[in-house]
Each structure stands twice: as structure tokens, then as C-alpha cells.
Image (cartoon, helix red, strand yellow):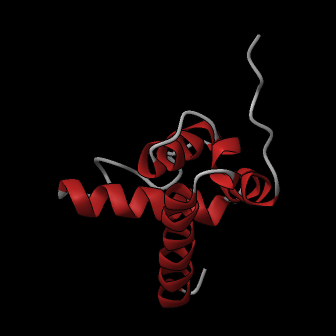
């Protein structure tokens, strides 16, 4: 019998962040920057909510956002993602 990890406040915050259009634009910007792509090659609005969830899970090293509430290193990485997003948002005026 396996027990499913239940998400808490951090998982909810991650889910809400993934649905935020500005966060998805941030992911577009980061991918363009990382891969040296132009806006024509990777237009704004490319990332979906599911893409955002995948990006968070991959960056935090988890299979489920629910794990963010139970793994301190994953929660720390998520906090860094949120801080980086807020810094970017302040610079671009989103």
C-alpha cells in the first residue's frame, strides 16, 4: 500500500504561480536568454500552465508539486524561483 504525498501551502503557491500569465512570460524570457533565441523563434505566450508546472518540477527535482512541502531542498529551490521571478517582474514592469 502506497501513500500519496499531500501538498500544502507551497504546492498551492506553485499551482497558482503556474497559472499566472506573467510567470509564463518570465519562462519565455528565461528560455530565450538561455538558448540565445529571438522573440520570433520563441514568442511570448509560448509556455502553458502545464509547461510552467513541468519547469518547476524539473528545477526543484520533484515528480509532484506536492513534494515541495516535504523536501526542504526542493522548497528552497522553489523559493529561489519565486524570488527570481519577482525581480524580473520588477525590472520589466509586469
Q: Position of residue 7 (x, y in %)?
A: 78, 45
Judged from this view, the residue extending furthest toward the front is 1
Q: Quick one: 81 or 22, which is closer to the camera?
A: 81
Residue at x 52%, y 45% (from the top left corner): 47
- Please determine whether, in this image, residue 55 is positioned above or below residue 94: above
- Please determine whether, in this image, residue 4 is positioned above or below residue 39: above
Q: Quick one: 76 or 28, which is closer to the camera?
A: 76
Q: Position of residue 85 (x, y in %)?
A: 52, 73
The quadrant holding residue 32 is bottom left
Q: Quick one: 67 or 56, which is closer to the camera?
A: 67
Q: How many marks?
A: 0
Judged from this view, the residue extending furthest toward the top is 1
**Horizontally, is 30 left or right of 5 in the view?**
left
Quadrant into which the N terminus falls: top right
Decide if residue 37 is in sight here: no
The quadrant holding residue 37 is bottom left
Quadrant into which the C terminus falls: bottom right
**Horizontally, is 32 left or right of 44 in the view?**
left
**Horizontally, is 69 left or right of 9 in the view?**
left
Residue at x 48%, y 63% (from the top left corner): 77
Decide if residue 1 is in sight here: yes
Q: Position of residue 45 (x, y in %)?
A: 53, 51
Residue at x 80%, y 39% (from the top left corner): 6
Q: Position of residue 28 (x, y in %)?
A: 43, 56
- Please determine whether, in this image, residue 24 is positioned above or below residue 2: below
Amino acid at each position: 500500500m502506497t501513500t500519496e504525498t499531500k501538498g500544502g501551502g507551497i504546492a498551492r503557491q506553485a499551482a497558482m504561480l503556474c497559472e499566472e500569465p506573467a510567470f509564463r512570460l518570465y519562462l519565455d524570457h528565461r528560455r530565450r536568454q538561455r538558448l540565445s533565441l529571438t522573440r520570433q523563434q520563441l514568442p511570448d505566450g509560448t509556455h502553458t500552465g502545464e509547461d510552467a508546472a513541468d519547469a518547476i518540477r524539473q528545477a526543484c527535482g520533484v515528480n509532484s508539486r506536492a513534494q515541495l512541502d516535504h523536501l526542504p531542498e526542493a522548497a528552497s529551490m522553489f523559493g529561489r524561483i519565486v524570488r527570481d521571478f519577482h525581480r524580473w517582474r520588477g525590472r520589466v514592469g509586469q
